[in-house]
Image (cartoon, helix red, strand yellow):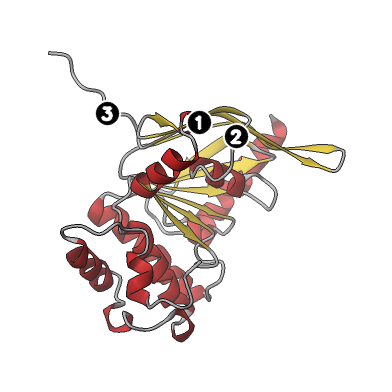
């Protein structure tokens, strides 16, 4: 009997993205390739303008690429038109952004429910997320009455409500103080360990990247370096490896 091969949750193959600025062409991504395995937590690091947010948006299908392929659970996003892509994204990808993007007029619980289409078990799932993320007592509050950390927890719960294959987070601690930011990072780490969630975050901060299993370094739209964190949660070690990777890129 032929063994069924399950594709990796995420495969990025030679992805190219260019932008036009006036008469100039900006090469945001210049052939980026990346594979993320099930249950893996990776951080994409790079300075401003390195292409890391563009890469995350390409992975999410929010940015149309000019070359290469993005495959989520084996599905090439370029093969999907707008409506099927939106439906596919809802089922397979959870998105968390720096600015939270909550609906001000809705309660915390209603914000969490927003992407879901209802069905059996939804109430139980919402309840489980509220309890697991420590925000059950804030369920009836609107975003304006919540702290930044609480709002980000609501955003994470909303991203998880459809049980996606991959959780994508773009600078998820950028709007938070350092203590709250570390609490959010620890929460993501626990979700990965306890639930085997596949998580991809974009950051420029070593104290965020240290929670990941693997760090991919981008510079000028290319990823030619990566290193493992070895679970040490050591921001200085991450910073040193990051700088060494950048120097190696310059030499090459």
Q: For the view shown, which residue lies furthest in the bottom direction?
A: 145
32 left or right of 160 in image: right
79 left or right of 136 in image: right
Of the pair 40 and 229, the residue shown nearer to us: 40
Callout 2 crowding tier (Cα within 10 Å): few <14, some 14–19, many ≥20: many
Instruction: Where is residue 248? Give x, y as percent.
Output: 65, 36
In the rendered structure, find residue 65 and report the number of the disc placed on it. Answer: 2
Of the pair 239 and 117, the residue shown nearer to us: 117
Question: Of circles 3 and 1, which is in front?
Answer: 1
In the picture, the quarter occupied by the C terminus is top right
Instruction: Where is residue 197? Give x, y as percent.
Output: 31, 50
Q: For the view shown, which residue lies furthest in the top direction?
A: 1
Callout 3 crowding tier (Cα within 10 Å): few <14, some 14–19, many ≥20: few
Q: Tell me the residue that label 3 is attached to.
A: 6
- Which type of secondary structure does the marked residue at label 2 adopt? loop
Circles 2 and 1, Cβ within 8 Å, touching? The answer is yes
Question: Of circles 2 and 3, which is in front?
Answer: 2
Q: Earlier in the sequence, mark 2 or mark 1?
A: 2
Q: Tell me the residue that label 1 is attached to.
A: 78
Instruction: Where is residue 198? Give x, y as percent.
Output: 35, 47
Of the pair 124 and 251, the residue shown nearer to us: 124
132 left or right of 226 in image: left
In the rendered structure, find residue 49 and report the number of the disc placed on it. Answer: none
The image shows residue 47, relative to residue 131, as above or below, that is above
- Which type of secondary structure does the marked residue at label 3 adopt? loop
Callout 1 crowding tier (Cα within 10 Å): few <14, some 14–19, many ≥20: some
Kindly report the distance in space between the C-alpha atoms of the residues bearing marks 2 and 1. Answer: 8 Å
């Amino acid at each position: 009997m032929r063994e069924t091969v399950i594709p990796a949750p995420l495969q990025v193959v030679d992805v190219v993205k260019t932008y036009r600025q006036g008469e100039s062409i900006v090469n945001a991504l210049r052939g980026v390739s990346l594979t993320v395995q099930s249950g893996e937590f990776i951080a994409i690091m790079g300075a401003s303008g390195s292409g890391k947010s563009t890469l995350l948006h390409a992975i999410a299908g929010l940015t149309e690429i000019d070359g290469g392929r993005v495959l989520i659970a084996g599905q090439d996003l370029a093969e999907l038109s707008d409506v099927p892509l939106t439906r596919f994204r809802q089922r397979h990808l959870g998105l968390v952004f720096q600015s939270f993007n909550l609906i001000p007029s809705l309660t915390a619980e209603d914000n969490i429910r927003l992407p879901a289409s209802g069905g059996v078990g939804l109430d139980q799932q919402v309840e489980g997320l509220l309890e697991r993320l420590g925000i059950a007592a804030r369920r009836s509050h609107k975003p304006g009455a919540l702290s930044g950390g609480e709002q980000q927890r609501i955003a994470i719960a909303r991203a998880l409500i459809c049980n996606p294959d991959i959780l994508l987070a773009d600078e998820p601690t950028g709007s938070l103080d350092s203590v709250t930011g570390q609490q959010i990072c620890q929460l993501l780490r626990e979700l990965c360990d306890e639930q085997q969630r596949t998580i991809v975050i974009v950051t420029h901060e070593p104290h965020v990247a240290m929670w990941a299993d693997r760090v991919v370094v981008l510079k000028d739209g290319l990823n030619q370096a990566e290193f493992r964190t070895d679970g040490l949660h050591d921001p200085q070690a991450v910073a040193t490896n990051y700088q060494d990777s950048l120097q190696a890129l310059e030499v090459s």
